[in-house]
Amino acid sequence: MGLGTLTGDRQAFFSNIRSNIKTPPGKKAKRVENPMEGLFTRNETTVEERRVLRDRFIKEWTTLGGQAFSLKNRDELAGKMDEIIKERNIKQAMRWAHPELDKLQLEDVFDTAQANLAKWPLAKNYDEWINKAEAMEAGIVWGDIAMAETGTLVLPASADQPTTITVLPITLIAIFTTAQLVDGFYSVMKLLKKRYGTNLPTTTTFISGPSRTSDIEMDLTIGVHGSKYVYACILDE
Amino acid sequence: MHIEPSFTKRYHKALSDKVMIKAVKLGTGRLRGKRADAIQAVGEKRWQEFRNRAEAIRLHVVQHLDQYLEQLVDNVLKKGGHVCLARTGDEAVEYIKNLAQKKNAKNIVKSKSMVTEEIHLNPALEKMGCKVIESDLGEWIIQLANETPSHIIVPAMHKNRFQVADLFNEVRGDEPKIPAETAELCAFARKYLRKTFMNIDLGITGCNFAVADSGAITICTNEGNARIVSALSSTLVTVMGMERILPSVEELAVMLSLLARSATGQKITVYNTLSAGIRAEMELDGPQEFHLVIVDNGRSKLLGSKYEKVLNCIRCGSCLNACPVYRNIGGHAYGWVYPGPIGAVLSPLLQGLDKYGELAYATTLCGACHTACPVKIPLHDMLYALRNDKVELEKKGELMEDLTYKGWSAAFASMSRYRFSIRMARRFQFPLVKAGKIAFGPPPISDWLKYRDMPALADEFFHEIWPELSKEGKEK
């Protein structure tokens, strides 16, 4: 990856800022150490505690307008997926090429339901994949991190985990285990820092429920741009 | 010289628009209620801790803006992005116009960005033949109506669904009309705008917060339009006001929690997207070319000034919902891009006190804006300071007012002069008094009396009866 270019007079731009900041160095406000400390819960959790977080996540996600299910094993997941496929009348869906999703053999569930599940990438050429992706009725992702306090999925993107799958289809299905659950922002940001340092993925998306707007007469309407139907399937770890 | 029409004419026009007033009262009332519920859920004590922390974070950032911006610029360049440092709005517009020309961009899709409103980007791009589509529902509505946003968070707050239906039916042309039902209007917007997302030549977004140490840009939307623009634009431009920056994701967590609760009463905005650099090898979506345009446009002159704290603003709009003036006149009466108390401060500071100084009087100085502000900007103090600055600027103009205040100042500066003045005023007020009230008088008293009652001076003043009263007290 090459370096980008800079337009504008860097020296003049920053000298102007520096000369205007008149506060003497000793009197400037200090950086807040541990800015999140005391504002968010920060529990190191056990398996049992994560089951409590699962219930919290389900409550929050449902309040936001999504549906969430606690599932014991792959068989229960298969049954739930079949229900969702039928409920939403899904004929074609796409999914992340994530190793955890590979293990779940979701293609078999779709085959049985006489629907098609395509694994990313759909095609290499933009014109080809964008048209295919636009026609997809559902996108399936692995919930890499799930924040219980707000009912939020945290999804780092990569070549196998494109944002497009969560952006275009009207239905979003996230599958994850209770091991992915953390309590709140404190744990999420610490986890991101531990995993990536300052070299964040190209895109990290925090998704909390379906797309919504109140732009017309403050009347809440679901699904104006992104997903209208959002499902979280949480497997017991 | 203030802009025309004057603020007085603008708010008179606003006050006569009953549909708008009703819509704004409904909208601001709901947002205030939701914010109050969110604070109650967090707990007042914890909420104040959030505010204190956020204020400290923003204060530090603004006083170290050069350092964090340099860090951001270096990190964006390192990740293959391009950066434009625009000292003025014109420089920013010129850069984006050149890029649009280079890319032969016909279809430009935008997500909500107040700073692009500020630099008048859309008209400049449209003038060169580009089709610019706003993808946020509220922004699209006002784009169709050829208006500016009337609220920072809900740009089309002033419109009702019947007006929106009229606008959408115009877009539909000969197709069957859609009814003024919110769900159907939104469904139409989804279908129509989805087509534009499939063919983006150039995507433009705003920026809620840039993160200096990772070169990331955070965009928060409830609709999800901005992330569609980011994911599907091979060339993406992000325009940011230069103060919209944070040191790391840890500070970001605090701000995202405050922003959502203050703006709409949500615990978190539905979509928060952190984008860092261009698409990586093997990635098929996301921008192949990324341009970050950092706009000064008058902000640097606020650094180190008594107005420095206005740069702490995170554009949540809660000061608008709290303000009794905004709630009664809506956003357009403020005349520029930013409405409400934050607009009344920012407009004269960024556009000139001579043009927008009148807005310093668009306030009751009740301080509700300060109480509502998540980063504790003393907006009411700033409005008061702006009044002083305006008086200084126009000192030579108002001779009568100048003499009145000079006389007042001289009388109140010494006890004996004050008591003498009071005695004289009481003696000579009788021709003006009717039923215990001052009924008429010379300007500026006559202007005051048009809208308010002014009681006549009392027969006895408290300081005159106090010696007697104090004696009585001692005797008891």
Image (spheres, coloured by chain):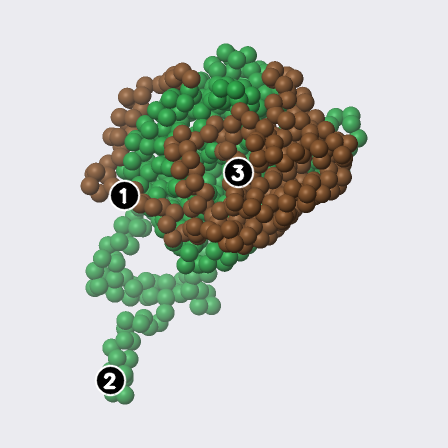
Chain colours: A brown, B green
Give the side of residue A162 with respect to residue B215, left or right: right
Quickly name the residue at label 2: B474
Q: Amino acid at mark 3?
A: Asp
Quickly name the residue at label 3: A144
Q: Residue at x 51, y 16 (%)?
A: B100
- Most foreground residue, B392 or B128: B128
| Rendered view: B260 above or below B368 | above
Does any portion of residue B365 appear in the rendered image?
A: no
Instruction: List the single residue furthest toward the bottom.
Output: B476
Q: For residue A29, which numbered disc appears in the image?
A: 1
**Neighbourhood count class around disc 1 (C-alpha, 10 Å): few under 14, some 14–19, many 20 upward:** some
Q: Position of residue B159 (x, y in %)?
A: 63, 40
| Rendered view: B392 above or below A162 | below
Q: Secondary structure at mark 1?
A: loop
Numbered disc in front, either 1 or 3: 3
- Most foreground residue, B271 or B241: B271
**Label 2 vs label 1: CA separation?**
53 Å
Q: Residue at x 45, y 21 (%)?
A: B291
| Rendered view: B70 above or below A109 | above
- Most foreground residue, A197 or B32: A197
Pick whichever of labels 1 and 3 is earlier in the sequence: 1
Numbered disc in front, either 2 or 3: 3
Q: Amino acid at mark 2?
A: Lys
Q: Secondary structure at mark 2?
A: helix
Q: Do the residues at pointers 2 and 1 share their chain?
A: no
- Most foreground residue, A191 or B311: A191
Q: Do the residues at pointers 1 and 3 share their chain?
A: yes
**Label 1 vs label 3: CA separation?**
37 Å
Q: Secondary structure at mark 3?
A: loop
Q: Do the residues at pointers 2 and 3 share their chain?
A: no
Q: Considering the image in quadrants, where does the C terminus of chain B appear?
A: bottom left
Give the side of residue A204 with respect to residue B294, left or right: right
